[in-house]
Amino acid sequence: MKKTFFILAAFLLIVASGFSFYHSSMVDSTSFKTKLEYKGMNLVAPIKELKNTTFDELKAHHINSISLIPYAFVDVENASVHYNNKRQWWGERTEGIIASNQLAHEYKMTVMLKPHLWVNHNFYTGNLDFATDSEWKKWEADYEKYILDFAQLAQQEKIELFCFGTELGNSVAKRPEYWSQLIQKIKKIYTGKLTYAANWDDFDKVPFWNELDYIGIDAYFPLSDATTPAVADLNEAWQQHILKMEKLQAKTNKKILFTEFGYRNSDQAAKEPWKENQSGINNLAQANAYESLFQTLTQKNWFAGGFAWKWYADAYHKEPKNSIDYTPQEKPALETIKKWYQ
């Protein structure tokens, strides 16, 4: 009888131990949260000056990094790139980048310098194309000067991260040799971290990730057609995109950085986040989309964080009040970001 009792007790102990191990493993896997290196915001350049109050607000929401964007204009007809134009806002020009970076460093923030292009005729940069090789070479020479000038500035000002291109899929696909030689020229000038901002639909086709420090993605992944998508449904929709990212990450052994991510406070905020065609104000849809992104991506140890799109240094987000925009400022989504950026 005693023998039977001890055997039964031992069996129950083994079962209980197994359940405890299984349960604790489940808790560990679901409660895991990777430490975000970049708790960032893409800063919309100020028109004239950048004030301390902007950084006070950023710090109050646990933001530890900003992206500064020196815009250039592409004239397709002349295959040319123009920048540092006096008609540009102060924060988009070299003088504004230097001052903004210095202020960010005073607030102990890291900085990503992320050149962007405006293309005349208002078409998408990823479709940039030229009919002849001579036109391509003319544009590439201009673009190289633009990028190397800012790579030199990034080195001079000790900017921690340099993103040398944004959503230039057609150029990367058609002219890969150009990009490889440009990367080598950048590395001779700039010794900080290096990335490129691929669009969400072509990041797995970029041939030069092994030459960079991060896989950069402008992460406007389509997730849901729902007017106000539920967080759980969005979490499920992320899985197909995560599988694609994980495949590339395993191949390159590089961390993934969301060089841009964001949602407008509109109906169907997660349907096609890169578009601005929804007109109904929907703050909950925006907040849910952010919540899902953080719930999902912070479970991945290869996720380095990223830069939300976007934060106004000037008070545009207040005029008119309750407008639809990407910025989370003065919207429920900002509290969601603050929670996850702690």
Image (cartoon, rainbow, N blue to C red):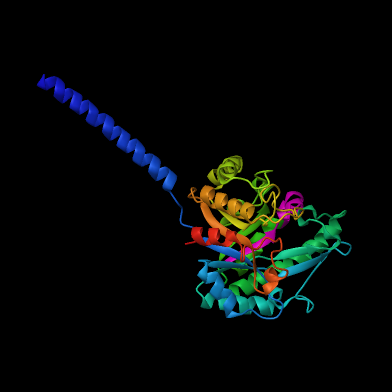
| Horizontal arrangement in the rendering, residue 11 relative to residue 21 (left or right) | left
User: Residue 81 lies in what quarter of the image?
Assistant: bottom right
Q: Picture coordinates of residue 333 (x, y %)?
A: 59, 59
Q: How many marks?
A: 0
Asked where in the image residue 165 lies, by quadrant, the reply is bottom right
**What residue lies at 77% left-to-right and 53% top-to-bottom?**
277
Quadrant, the N terminus: top left
Towards the viewer: 105 or 26: 26
How far from the left and from the top, in percent, is residue 130?
A: 85, 55
Residue 9 point in image, percent of width and height: 18, 27
**Residue 41, quarter of picture:** bottom right
Q: Read off the magenta span.
A: 161-178
Task: Residue 154: give x, y in percent of width and height.
Answer: 61, 72
Is 176 part of what is drawn in magenta? yes
On the question of residue 218 being in view, the answer is no
Please tell me which residue lies in front, 94 or 328.
328
Q: Residue at x 63, y 52 (%)?
A: 285
Give whichever of 212, 292 is nearer the camera.
292
**Above or below — where is 20 with respect to 86?**
above
For residue 341: magenta?
Answer: no
In this picture, residue 160 sits left or right of residue 311: left
Does residue 27 appear in the picture of this structure?
yes
Which residue is rendered at x = 65% and y = 57% of the image?
197
